[in-house]
Image (tube, rainbow, N blue to C red):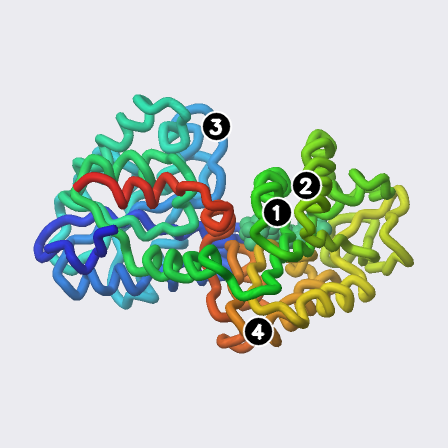
């Protein structure tokens, strides 16, 4: 893979696809980790006199057409403002993604200046399954610059116009974040020291359920918590009350459990929970006496017995990959499970990697020491797909061609 350092960028316009998909509370950024992670590449390009055009997505804009999505938001304006603060220089935000405003702003840059395009997911074509539809947007993005740098690791598993199609149209290279992420993940996939323990949690249940089958045979132990655990418990016939459930995934989960059994992979599920009667910060937490959850209650964190069980299952680990908070850590009453897992992993001597936007935010939120983990990845889905051995479209595009 060509490195951004190898590009001759002086006085040239470089389109940089970054991952600035930060967690937001309204218009407030609750964790700017991904913006900070984009700085090394952006600072390097600025210092080398490039005209930098940043392309990124934020959240999931809704609506059929561009106008509806742009009106509904979220705009990248707060992100552009934070990036400007961190870079210590202005970041002009185009009013559109790849239209008149974007072209005018890109054309008006001088060496060392930075501009940002609006949320690329305002363009429905960005995520289209139709190659031609994506290609049209990629064409409009490509005319903004003479070179492309791919540094948005967290989006690399998406075959999206700005991630996959645009680099194919321009001389391209990988940014520093992507190179660093790939170096660590490669260590995890090439003969990891054992026991190798994978901890999965979080809320993107269907995305993550799909990867479990593929992790079987790679990891020695799979600890499952967070929102996805309830589909597993339901598959085993437990009562889960009103907890998060993807009922249509039960057959797949049952199969994954059977495969794990055959492969000798130990799957560890929660044995107790912290539950509440609603999803709210001020909901009263209650600890269950076992794995079942009564009707009218929802599991929002792992319980004390599970915290101990998980810590024991991590104690002898030599390699750990963790994606997805095991509880709703944003609510202090339901953060103990995430803290316990984070602490248990921080005691592991060996390679420890945390991946996922919210997981990384959780680690920073809990104020663990910076060196608690070997690596905090910006990628959740992207890291998981890399670990499964799948080709990431964004990486493939950077590896191919010019
Ligand atoms: P990541 O971004 O690290 O990949 P996800 O996006 O999958 O993680 O999930 C993060 C979210 O999962 C957090 O906001 C957390 O509140 C939520 N979560 C964790 N446990 C539960 C649960 N039991 N029920 C509902 N949501 C949960
Ligand atoms: Mg997330």
Q: Are marks 2 and 3 in contact (CB under 8 Å)?
A: no
Which percent across, then down, holds residue 114?
A: 22, 55
Mark 3 neighbour class, 10 Å CA radius: few under 14, some 14 to 19, many 20 or more: some
Disc nearer the start of the sequence (4/2): 2
Whether residue 255 sits left or right of residue 218 in the image: it is: right
Q: Which mark is residue 367?
A: 4
Q: Are marks 1 and 2 in contact (CB under 8 Å)?
A: yes
Residue at the image position 82 percent from the left and 54 percent from the top: 275
Label 4 vs label 2, nearer the camera = 2
Q: Nearer the viewer, mark 4 or mark 3?
A: 4
Residue lying farthest left? 11
Instruction: Count residues near mark 2 (Cα–Cα under 10 Å), then give few for <14, some for 14-19, many for 20+.
Output: some
Q: Are marks 1 and 3 in contact (CB under 8 Å)?
A: no
Instruction: Identify the residue position indicated by label 3 in the image.
Output: 63
Residue sitting nearer the eye, 226 or 55: 226
Residue at image x 56%, y 75%?
A: 349
Which mark is nearer the camera, 1 or 3?
A: 1
109 to the left or right of 174: left
Label 1: how many Cα within 10 Å (few below 14, some 14–19, many 20+): many
Which is nearer the N-term, disc 4 or disc 3?
A: 3
Of callouts 1 and 3, which one flags the residue occurring earlier in the amino acid sequence?
Answer: 3
10 Å neighbourhood of mark 4: few (<14), some, or many (≥20)? few
Residue where numbered disc 2 is placed? 259
Circle 2 SS class: helix
**Which SS class for mark 4?**
loop
Task: Determine which residue is flagged by label 1.
Answer: 216
Mark 3 C-beta closer than 8 Å to ligand 2: no
Q: Earlier in the sequence, mark 1 or mark 2?
A: 1
Give how far across and how far down residue 82 sits, in percent: 38, 60
Dots 4, 1 in contact, CB < 8 A: no
């Amino acid at each position: 893979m060509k490195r951004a350092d190898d590009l001759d960028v002086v006085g040239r316009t470089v389109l940089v696809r970054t991952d600035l998909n930060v967690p937001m509370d309204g218009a407030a950024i609750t964790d700017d980790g991904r913006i900070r992670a984009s700085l090394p590449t952006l600072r390097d390009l600025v210092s080398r006199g490039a005209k930098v055009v940043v392309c990124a997505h934020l959240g999931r804009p809704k609506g059929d057409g561009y106008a509806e999505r742009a009106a509904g938001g979220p705009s990248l304006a707060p992100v552009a403002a934070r990036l400007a603060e961190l870079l210590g220089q202005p970041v002009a935000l185009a009013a559109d993604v790849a239209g008149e405003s974007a072209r005018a702003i890109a054309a008006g840059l001088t060496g060392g200046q930075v501009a940002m395009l609006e949320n690329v997911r305002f363009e429905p074509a960005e995520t289209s399954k139709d190659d031609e539809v994506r290609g049209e947007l990629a064409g409009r993005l490509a005319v903004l610059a003479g070179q492309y740098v791919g540094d948005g690791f967290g989006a690399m598993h998406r075959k999206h116009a700005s991630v996959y199609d645009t680099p194919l149209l321009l001389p391209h290279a990988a940014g520093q974040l992507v190179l660093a992420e790939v170096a660590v993940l490669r260590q995890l996939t090439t003969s990891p020291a054992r026991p190798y323990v994978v901890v999965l949690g979080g809320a993107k249940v269907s995305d993550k359920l799909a990867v479990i089958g593929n992790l079987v045979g790679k990891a020695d132990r799979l600890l499952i918590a967070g929102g996805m655990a309830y589909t597993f418990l339901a598959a085993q016939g437990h009562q889960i009350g009103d907890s998060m459930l993807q009922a249509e995934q039960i057959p797949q989960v049952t199969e994954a459990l059977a495969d794990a059994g055959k492969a000798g992979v130990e799957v560890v599920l929660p044995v107790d929970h912290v539950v509440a009667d609603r999803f709210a910060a001020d909901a009263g937490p209650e600890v269950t006496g076992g794995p079942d959850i009564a009707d009218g209650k929802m599991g929002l964190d792992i319980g004390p017995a599970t915290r101990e069980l998980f810590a024991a299952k991590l104690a002898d680990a030599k390699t750990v990959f963790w994606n997805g908070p095991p509880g709703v850590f944003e609510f202090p009453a339901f953060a103990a499970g995430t803290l316990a897992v984070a602490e248990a992993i921080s005691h592991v001597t060996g390679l420890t990697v945390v991946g996922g936007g919210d997981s990384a935010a959780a680690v920073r939120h809990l104020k663990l020491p910076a060196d608690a983990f070997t690596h905090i990845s910006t990628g959740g889905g992207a890291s998981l797909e890399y670990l499964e051995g799948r080709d990431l479209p964004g990486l493939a595009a950077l590896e191919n061609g010019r």
